[in-house]
Amino acid sequence: LGLLTTLAGPALAADHAEAPNTSIDPAADIADLFLWENGGGQTVAILTFAGLGGAGGMATYDEDVLYGIHLDTDLDNIEDWTIWVRYGVDGLGNWGVQVTGLPGTGATVIGPVEQVIQTAGGRVWTGLRDDPFSFDLQGFNDTLYTGTLGFDSNRDSLAGTNVTAVVLEFDTAAALGASTQARVWATSSRF
């Protein structure tokens, strides 16, 4: 079973704060979406946002942002399954995460941030992590300026930067149903 990662519709923002105005709302700025099947019948999805954070910083949580991971299992570019993620803070200032629609769980997953939340059929974790995306910005700019490829695989312009990540593990068969593939995209919205 394979999951295809595609973007549905036009992109309204870009990765890692490149789009105009993303720096004014880092919590809503999606950096990347990674998906893979772990070989044990589970799919792992990692959604990162609030990129380019400095080392030693704090994770970014915002109770007014809703994140969606959308799966289109019949390939008609309309979501057939959506996983919703949002954050909240209690009266003592402790942050928590709420996940609804996690395939194979049948219930809303609620728990503290920065701890693995085990649930029937899956797991959830969220917190600050080293940005897994790698990019040679100098090589990109050199290539644009000279017309000659100038990338260096040992140069990572994002090294030492952090993102806030939400990691979801869920049952692949429950997500796909009778399908063997899916189109997947992520959204964020402020309300």
Image: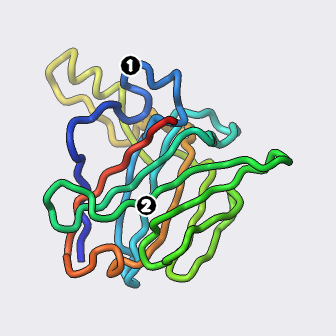
Residue extending furthest right? Answer: 92
Residue nearest the viewer, comparing 126 with 71:
71
Amino acid type for the residue under numbered disc 2: Ile
Q: Quadrant of the N terminus?
A: bottom left
- Tell me the residue at 33%/56% (across/down): 70
Amino acid type for the residue under numbered disc 1: Pro
Residue at disc 2, secondary structure: strand
Residue nearest the viewer, comparing 146 with 81:
81
* Circle on res. 83: 2
Q: Is residue 158 above or below residue 101?
A: above
Mark 1 nearby-residue class (10 Å; few <14, some 14–19, many ≥20): few
* Circle on res. 20: 1
- Tell me the residue at 59%/77% (across/down): 119
On the image, the x and y values in percent for residue 65 come to 53, 40
Residue extending furthest top? Answer: 145
- Tell me the residue at 54%/42% (across/down): 163
On the image, the x and y values in percent for residue 31 come to 43, 40
The colour scheme used here is rainbow
- Tell me the residue at 14%/21% (across/down): 147
Mark 2 nearby-residue class (10 Å; few <14, some 14–19, many ≥20): some
Residue nearest the viewer, comparing 8 with 129:
8
On the image, the x and y values in percent for residue 85 come to 52, 54
Q: Are marks 2 and 1 in contact (CB under 8 Å)?
A: no
- The mark nearer the N terminus, 2 or 1, is 1
Q: Quadrant of residue 69 in the image? A: bottom left
Residue at disc 1, secondary structure: loop
Query: Which mark is in front, 2 or 1?
Result: 2
Q: Is residue 66 above or below residue 112?
A: above
On the image, the x and y values in percent for residue 102 come to 46, 69
